[in-house]
Image (cartoon, rainbow, N blue to C red):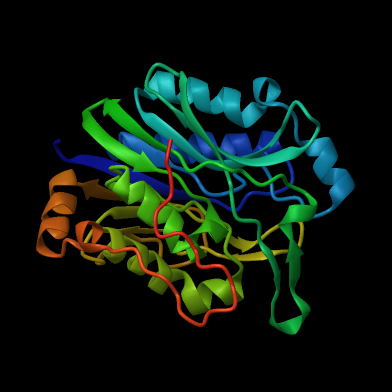
Amino acid sequence: MGAFKAAAIQMRSGTSPERNAVDLERLVREAAGQGATYIQSPEMTGALVRDSQARAAAFTSEDKDIIVSTSRKLAKDLGIFLHIGSTAILRADGKLANRALLFAPDGATIATYDKIHMFDVDLDNGESWRESAAYEAGTEAVVTEISGAGIDGARLGFAVCYDLRFPQLFRAEALAGAVLLSVPAAFTRQTGEAHWHVLLRARAIENGAYVVAAAQGGLHEDGRETYGHSLIVDPWGRIVAEAAHDEPAVIVADIDPAQSAAARKKIPNLKNARDFAVNGGQAEALPLRGAAS
């Protein structure tokens, strides 16, 4: 597998999917102009909408969604892999999914992933979120191969934002062959300042994999504030690209799957992991390995 250029685009999505689609296209074209053939956008690329009635009006099914149609055309026009970190998609059962989509250079959808872990938290200063009240959680980890557009069969593992705090998901994907792990996000400012960098570097180090994390940043129309600081981290845990602010931006870095193989050879913790029992624990032990599709 040869090296290729990956990009993370940092956005400040508002409440209008149409306006956000325009911003998406501008940033994707900028990234492609810098030579990136895998381009990732942040969580909730389509819109960040806190009000439930406005949210219901803003989102639609995948076949009618403007972010999906814009992305499909961009991927084909530019000959790239375009990874929409996530956008809200209305499912057939009437529930919303926080869904990532990967488009191939011919415009086809080659993978989707519905965010598994819902952001249900109570933070300092009264900030509280209940993602599960608006979205249906996914149930499957996803690993897929990206091959073409100068990329020779790299395997990509999916995650979205709060998934970052669940290392077993990334371990399962690494064991399924992922050398590139994705963490598109809309991290709050206070959690981002505390944990963003260290968690992303940890996931890269633990799994000997690159991590690409496109982020939302700044003060949004719906009143929330996100951290920004989109990152690309190499398999040794080094930050190789960062948008060191919360403004819209593009960052680009080389991804060399051989570096993942080298890191895993030096520290073969994926091979050395052992199952174990917890003696005296009061809660059911988490699984050490999971299934990826």
**In terms of depth relative to the viewer, which is nearer, 253 or 281?**
281
Residue 129 vertical position relative to residue 117 in the rendered view, above or below: below
| Residue 9 visible somewhere in the drawing | yes
Residue 252 lies left or right of residue 160; in this view the side is: left
Residue 205 vertical position relative to residue 88 in the rendered view, above or below: below
**In terms of depth relative to the viewer, which is nearer, 50 or 180?**
180
Residue 292 lies left or right of residue 67; in this view the side is: left
Measured as percent of width and height from the top left, residue 61 is found at 72, 26
Where, by quadrant of the figure, is residue 274 drawn? Answer: bottom left
| Residue 256 visible somewhere in the drawing | no
Pick the quarter of the image with the C terminus. top left
Tell me what residue is drawn at x 60 percent, y 53 percent: 12
Tell me what residue is drawn at x 48 percent, y 49 percent: 159
Q: Residue furthest toward the right?
A: 53
Residue 220 vertical position relative to residue 194 in the rendered view, above or below: above
Residue 223 lies left or right of residue 194; in this view the side is: right
